[in-house]
Image (tube, rainbow, N blue to C red):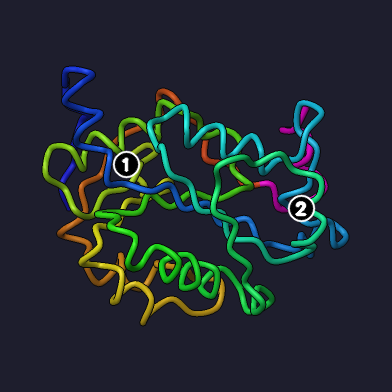
Amino acid sequence: MTHHKAPKTRPDTAARATDGIAGLLLAAGGGRRLGGRPKALLPHHGRPLVEHAVAVLRAGGCTRVHVVLGAAAATVRERADLPGCVLVDNPEWTEGMGSSLRVGLESLAGTGTDAALVSLVDQPGIGPQAVARVLAAYGSGASLAAAAYGGERGHPVLFGAGHWAGVAASATGDRGARAYLKAHDEAITLVECGDVARPYDIDTEADLMHLE
């Protein structure tokens, strides 16, 4: 596994390098441990959490964003302001994150996208700086990269298009891309982000303290 620090690049060079990357936000979860409250609709700064997650991707450098919806998808579409996003429904969202990852990657096929930067809607402690660092890893040649926190792999994760078929084939249940990443451990560029982000999840009632 390669450890990597974000390179220093000129802004115009960085922009060219990341033009072909799409942000892929997984926002289909039903919040089972939150009493069945869809995670995309949890309030954060007075707006649905999904809006915050999309704003983070855009501020970090993703000009194109695909959002995978599942639980209460119609309500999310109605309540959340997501202009310019491609909204993708996952009718099998109850099967877990793996199904959302497969649907999201499928939505990017044929769009000319070179890589997908995958993030999760329920990690509001991960902001634009972490996104930008992982994008920069792609700009310096990595086709498989992930943010790391204290050396431990986390999100966001970047997959070059050449990895999508393998990721989709192994994405089952709630494991997402874990099996694929484990099998390709030595090829992953880890980008330390522990100094700029906190990778907690909003999974339980106690976790709601992280939202405002």
Q: Is residue 95 above or below residue 6?
A: below
* Residue situated in front as seen by the camera: 25 or 199: 25
> What is the x, y in percent for residue 11?
23, 18
Distance from disc 1 to disc 2, alpha carbons, whole Å, reads: 35 Å
Residue 208 within the segment the image draws in magenta: yes
> What is the x, y in percent for residue 190?
25, 44
> What is the x, y in percent for residue 209?
78, 33
Q: Is residue 84 above or below residue 10?
A: below
Q: Which residue is painted at 55% across and 68% down in the image? A: 100
Q: Is residue 100 above or below residue 24?
A: below
- Which residue matches tag 2? 76
Please indicate whether residue 10 sits to the left or right of residue 39 in the image.
left
* Residue situated in front as seen by the camera: 200 or 22: 22
Q: The residue tagged with tag 1: helix, strand or loop?
A: loop
Please indicate whether residue 63 sits to the left or right of residue 185 in the image.
right
Name the residue type under label 2. Answer: Val
Q: Give the range drawn in magenta.
A: 202-212
Name the residue type under label 1. Answer: Gly
Please indicate whether residue 70 sits to the left or right of residue 162 in the image.
right
Quadrant where the C terminus lies?
A: top right
Q: Which residue is painted at 30% across and 65% down in the image? A: 181
> What is the x, y in percent for residue 189?
20, 47
Q: How many labels does the image show?
A: 2
- Which residue matches tag 1? 151
Q: The residue tagged with tag 2: helix, strand or loop?
A: helix
The single residue placed furthest to the left in the displayed view is 141
Marking on residue 84: none
Please indicate whether residue 11 sits to the left or right of residue 81 in the image.
left
Sequence-first disc among 1 and 2:
2
Instruction: Indicate the quadrant where residue 147 lies.
Output: top left
Residue 84 within the segment the image draws in magenta: no
